[in-house]
Image (cartoon, rainbow, N blue to C red):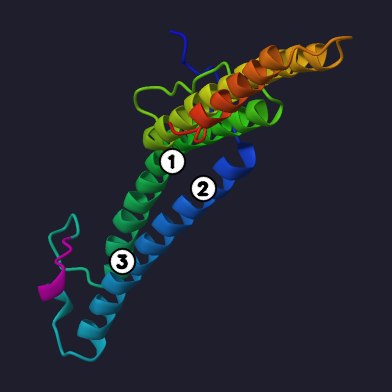
């Protein structure tokens, strides 16, 4: 496949910042939710007059109620769940950042090509990449620039040819005023027709 990227780390600095922020967001949310649940249990047990056995019932193998390890019973699964979420979120954030960093890298390359004067290319992104709308706008801009530059080059060649003919007639030993006037009128008509040359 032509547009398949071989590496997942394209813009390392951007992707590292993206993953770090994503992971910090998830860690912050999980710590907040874990802390909220533990605080709720703590407040209900110590200040709400709730029976710990009514909040969470822990039966020992002997069948007796054990409330001394209430926080451990709640905290251990929460930490395990948070670690699982973290373990899943890091690779997912790498994959998603790849779908962002790849198009950004391609757009940067395209700007570099434009700055060097190259306009014979189009931006092609993968089907699942982000910023496709931006690539489409950039392709439209490149196409417009290509046509405008083509028209400028064509106009330059025509003007140069006609001014050369006018100079040749003006520098002749005997000036043919009728031919000279005709060439000047042709040049004037050329400019009138191109009053708005870049109207794409």
Front-most of residues 33 and 77 = 33
Question: Residue at label 3?
Answer: 33
Q: CA distance from mark 1 to mark 3?
A: 21 Å
Q: Secondary structure at mark 1?
A: helix
> Total label count?
3
Residue 8, compared with residue 6, is above or below; it is below
Q: Main secondary structure of the magenta part?
A: loop
What quarter of the picture does the N terminus occupy? top left
Q: Residues within 10 Å of mark 1 (few under 14, many from 20)?
A: some
Q: Is residue 7 left or right of residue 69?
A: right
CB-based contact (under 8 Å), mark 2 and mark 3: no
Q: Is residue 163 visible?
A: yes
Question: Residue at label 2?
Answer: 18
- Residue 192 on image: x %, y %: 52, 31
- Residue 63 on image: x %, y %: 12, 60
Q: What's the mark number on residue 66?
A: none
Q: Secondary structure at mark 2?
A: helix
| Residue at the image point whose x is 52% and y is 22% from the top | 147
Question: Residue at label 1?
Answer: 93
The magenta stretch is 54-59
CB-based contact (under 8 Å), mark 2 and mark 1: yes
Residue 190, compared with residue 165, is above or below; it is below
Front-most of residues 20 and 147 = 147
CB-based contact (under 8 Å), mark 1 and mark 3: no
């Amino acid at each position: 496949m032509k547009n398949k990227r071989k590496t997942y780390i394209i813009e390392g600095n951007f992707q590292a910042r993206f993953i770090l922020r994503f992971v910090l967001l998830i860690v912050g949310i999980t710590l907040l939710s874990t802390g909220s649940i533990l605080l709720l249990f703590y407040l209900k047990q110590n200040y709400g007059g709730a029976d710990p056995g009514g909040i969470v019932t822990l039966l020992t193998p002997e069948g007796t109620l054990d409330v001394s390890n209430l926080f451990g019973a709640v905290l251990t699964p929460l930490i395990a769940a948070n670690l699982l979420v973290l373990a899943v979120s890091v690779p997912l954030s790498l994959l998603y950042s790849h779908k962002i960093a790849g198009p950004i890298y391609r757009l940067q390359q395209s700007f570099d090509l434009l700055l060097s004067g190259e306009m014979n290319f189009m931006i092609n992104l993968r089907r699942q990449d982000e910023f496709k709308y931006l690539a489409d706008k950039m392709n439209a801009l490149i196409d417009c620039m290509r046509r405008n530059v083509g028209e400028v080059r064509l106009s330059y060649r025509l003007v140069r040819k006609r001014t050369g003919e006018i100079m040749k007639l003006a520098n002749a030993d005997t000036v043919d005023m009728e031919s000279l006037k005709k060439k000047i009128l042709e040049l004037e008509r050329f400019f009138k027709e191109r009053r708005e040359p870049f109207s794409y």
